[in-house]
Image: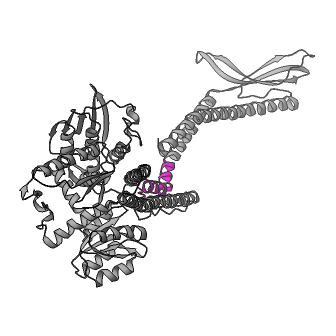
Amino acid sequence: MKILVIEDNVELLKDIKNFLDEQGNVCEIAPNYQSAYMKAVIFPYDILVVDITLPDGTGLDIIKEVKKENIDVGIIIISAKNAVGDKVNGLEVGADDYLTKPFYLVELNARIKALYRRKVYKGSKEILFNEIRIKPGSYEVFVNNRLMNLTKKEFDIIHFFVANKNRLLTKEAIAEHLWGDHIEMVDSFNFIYTHLANLRKKITKFGGNDYIKSIYSVGYKFSE
Amino acid sequence: MNLVTKTNKYYLVFFVLLFPLMVATDFYLIRYFVSKEVDDILRHESERIIFSLKEKGAFLPSNYLFEINPLKEDSSVLNKYRDTLIYEDYANKFIPYRTYEFTTQVDSQKVRVSIHHILLEMNELVVWLFVATSLIILLLITGLFFINQVIYKWTWKPFFKNLSKVTNYDITKKNPVSLEVSNISEFQELNKIVTGLMNQVKKDFHNLKEFNENIAHEIQTPLAIIRNKMVLLLESQNLSKKELQWVKAVYQEANKLSKIGKSLTLISRIENQEFRRLNSVDIHTIVDNIVGNMEEMIQFKNLTIKVKLYPVKVKCDLILANILFTNLIKNAVQHNQEGGFIEMLLNEEKFEIINTGAISSIETAQLFNRFQRGNKVTTSLGLGLAINQKICEMYGFRLNYDLHENKHKLSLYFNTRCAF
């Protein structure tokens, strides 16, 4: 997948680029409006990750330009402005998704993948990880071709894990993914712990491997 | 009390105090001049009598009733005026007279002469003069009063227009207030000051807003970077146990900081009235969605949930409504005990949520303050209810906390103006 990340903070830009590169994407960067506009209009990308506040312009204008040129690209806004107006404006000019800073890189990654799937495969594409097969469109997970009976949150967890395989998913990132931005719940870590245990049990019962590893006590990693 | 009533009140007080004084002065002045006139007449008559005695040696016929009394040679009595009552047979009563007594010589015999002038018509004159002038004073004062009212309304017109303009002034709106121009220098000055103040307030408001936005932007991005680097450190897997603890602490604190920032920004945005959309929000659906989102958490905590929702629509911002109800329901789940229960009721008047849970050590009044945490649960920020309070203030909702039979009960009363 070809991704252009437009973000004025160079350090954050590097973080995002490294993360996305390691996921096997081709990730290009633009730290300001000028270079972002040039790249977005000339080169074909699958996904644009756009920061609203740029030193020489606004990300909204880039989105408008791209839409004016009829370029077919998925757009995710990343903004610190957390303002409702921004979100509404962004989605109105044609962005597909909106993330408020500070976001977890794993969350951005999952959103990019989901958006890409929606755009290119219209959501019909299955996600494969060895014996595990996920059908995001119908919220179904198969292990060794057997349909697992999962709750909604369990599905969200495994989907999130597979989208971010080999990466550390902190409990905070998982909690925010499951419940959203403004809910910090005291019990969410216990909840995640219990449901992960359930998930492991279910997968192994269906003859799958246990890919979920606890990393120190901060989070989990889904890897072979 | 408004300006007109206040002025009128003072006007009335002064009038009530001054009018008797004016009338009394008026009365005494008139009486003084009338009696002086009578005295003058009597003195004039006495001089005529004395002159005639000197020249002709006889009393003149006089209209003024007079009596003559011989005096001893050596006695000396001063001339004097006095009021007397003389009995008149025809009227069968005493009639008031003004008397002038003077001493003169008749054929080398010293005599005391008294002349009288009737006061009847004089008293009448005094009374009529008094009534006439009092009426004129009264007319003048009431006339002045009404003229004042008209002048007052006319001259203060720009002031009242400006007053309503300033009252309706909305700092979040871009268009500036154009104050009514007046040729009265005090009003001009006031306009200048008010305009200056409004500009200053506006500037401060925008600075504050900018500061908030900057905080949100400038702090969140570094926090995101800190967080990313900490995850990278954790992923590197080469950390000693001690180092791991440090990294973990930094990661968690950065998370907390970011959440505090987000919540405080949200509060100030609500205070700045930046959420001004008035959707007709279907509360029923919102509550349903939130409960759905927490369903598994509710199961996880073994909570019994009883929900009774009637379709209710309230005019407010959809996002704020979501935050408000999420906070309320989340709290009921979060502060609940294992195997407890939650009961929700939604109707036209209110949303009520009752839940079991440990009894909070915080006073009810402080519950809605920032950074108040009930059960010393350190992962909670204590900003949820403060945010709720702000949202309620904005829409005129009322949030009420009750401890009833060891159950927490939060009631949210919708404004009758908004609910329908």
| Relative to A6, residue B259 above or below | above
Nearer to the camera, B241 or B16: B241
Residue at image coords 35%, 75%: A29
Say if residue B310 shows up in the picture: yes
Q: Which residues are magenta?
A: B146-175
Image location of residue B10, percent across then percent down = 54, 39
Residue A27 quadrant: bottom left
Residue A106 quadrant: bottom left
Q: Is residue B111 left or right of residue A202?
A: right
* Quadrant of the image containing the N terminus of chain A: bottom left
Residue A14 inside the magenta-drawn segment: no
Residue at image coords 52%, 38%: B12
Q: Is residue B316 left or right of residue B113?
A: left
Q: Is residue B340 left or right of residue B181?
A: left
Say if residue A51 shows up in the picture: no
Nearer to the camera, A161 or B407: A161
Residue B152 inside the magenta-drawn segment: yes
Image location of residue A185, percent across then percent down = 30, 45
| Relative to A212, residue B104 above or below | above
Nearer to the camera, A220 or B137: A220
Single out the residue that lies furthest toward the left.
A146
